[in-house]
Amino acid sequence: MVNKAYLREYKEDDVKVAKTSYSYPNISNRAFKNLGVIDFNMCQSLHQEELKKLERWEREFRLDKLKFARRKLVACALSAAAMLFAPELSDARISWIKHAVLTYVVDDFFDVGSSQQEQENLTHLLDKWDIDEDTEFCSEAVEIIFLALRDTIHESVDMALKWQGRCVKAHLIQIWMDVLKTMGREAQWGRDKVVPTMDEYIENGFDSFALGPIVLPTLYIVGPKLSEEIVASPEYHSLYKLMATCGRLLNDIQTYEREAKQGKLNAVPLHIIHRGGIITEEDSVKEIREIIGENRKKLLRMILESKDSVVPRACKDLFWDMSQVLHLFYSEVDGFSSPTAMVTAINEVLYMPIDCNEMKIECC
């Protein structure tokens, strides 16, 4: 949206003023604007083709049959396009979007679409990995989700192999295992009426928020080499934890009223409980926003730090970009769940090309 707005406001007769006035002698500003518009429309067309393929993927793996699951393909595509817009990053976008869609499916599965037996069955199947498909599913929902997860992980492993020259399957399986285990723990807390401490909640919640399966596999497909040593480094883990904690708390601020009615754990009421009930919801939200602000500052410092850093800058930037997208989606409402909150952004980025006639340029 920013690029689109910039192109609309771009002044063809502007002159760069530094020590002296300057303009390109052989290339006009109009030519730059034309190229920018062509590039935007071409990228948007590519994103639309990818979206059609992903819609077929949803149907092929019967994800549309899971009535309890939210359909968030387009919102996930927007988040990918906002950061990974370049044509050469198509593999990264596809991986990002498929894993993001599956995080919604799995989240809804643990929240409202499954029994404890089904939750344990899905976790066991992923842990075992090589299974007898004819005998080991306890329900159709488990079968649909596991087969979609397995195929998507396999595909991301193949994509990563082209960039990294090594197999990352064990890591990708572990990323999803962490999500299933932490979601299962939250479900068990709910069944047992457990009230965790804020530290316990956040320590579990940054994984259960499920940014790991979206961002971490994509890091393998954006270009830089990521050795096992880098992936196991404290820096890599801290970047992920800071980003994911911000996401978890931003989400909680926008969803606490709805989740309170559903009986779900949430940082806002939990913070009130552990403050002895002496603060209001407004004060709780304010204090949690301060926690988010501190975590964002730490995240930005780590991204800008070059001394003793082992994580490539392009990968660190993706953590920050995701943090920015989270603030976009959760600035006023839960943009991922609201059917109308992100309509304008979705249309502008994914569906509405720049009108060359409106801009009075010859580019189409």
Image (tube, grey):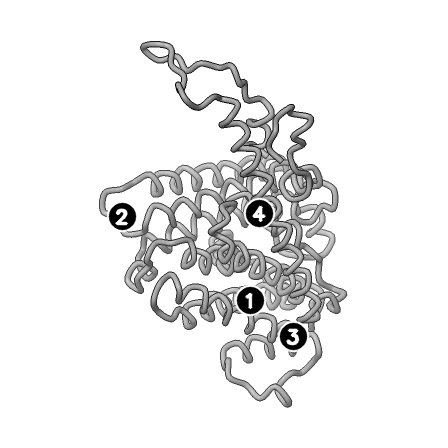
Q: Is residue 298 above or below residue 3?
A: below
Residue 280: which quarter of the image?
A: top right
Secondary structure category for the residue under label 2 = loop
Decide if residue 161 is on the left or right side of residue 334: left
Secondary structure category for the residue under label 1 = helix
Name the spot of residue 307 as percent of width and height, x first.
23, 43
Say which of 322 and 68 sits in front.
Answer: 322
Residue found at the far top of this picture = 20
Which label lies toward us, 1 or 2? 2
Secondary structure category for the residue under label 4 = helix
Q: Is residue 126 above or below residue 191?
A: below
Say which of 61 and 130 sits in front.
Answer: 61
Q: State the CA–CA distance, disc 3 to disc 2.
A: 42 Å
Q: Which residue is mark 2?
A: 309
Q: Which residue is mark 1?
A: 185
Q: Which residue is mark 4?
A: 79
Picture residue at 54% right of the left edge, 79% below the top: 124
Q: State the CA–CA distance, disc 2 to disc 4.
A: 27 Å
Picture residue at 35% right of the left edge, 63% below the top: 164
Q: State the CA–CA distance, disc 3 to disc 4.
A: 32 Å
Q: Amino acid at mark 2?
A: Ser
Secondary structure category for the residue under label 3 = helix
Picture residue at 47% right of the left edge, 43% below the top: 321
Q: State the CA–CA distance, disc 1 to disc 2.
A: 33 Å
Q: Amino acid at mark 4?
A: Ser
Picture residue at 55% right of the left edge, 85% below the top: 131
Q: Is residue 167 above or below residue 82?
A: below
Question: Tag 4 or tag 3, which sits nearer the N-term?
Answer: 4
Q: Which residue is mark 3?
A: 116
Q: Amino acid at mark 3?
A: Gln
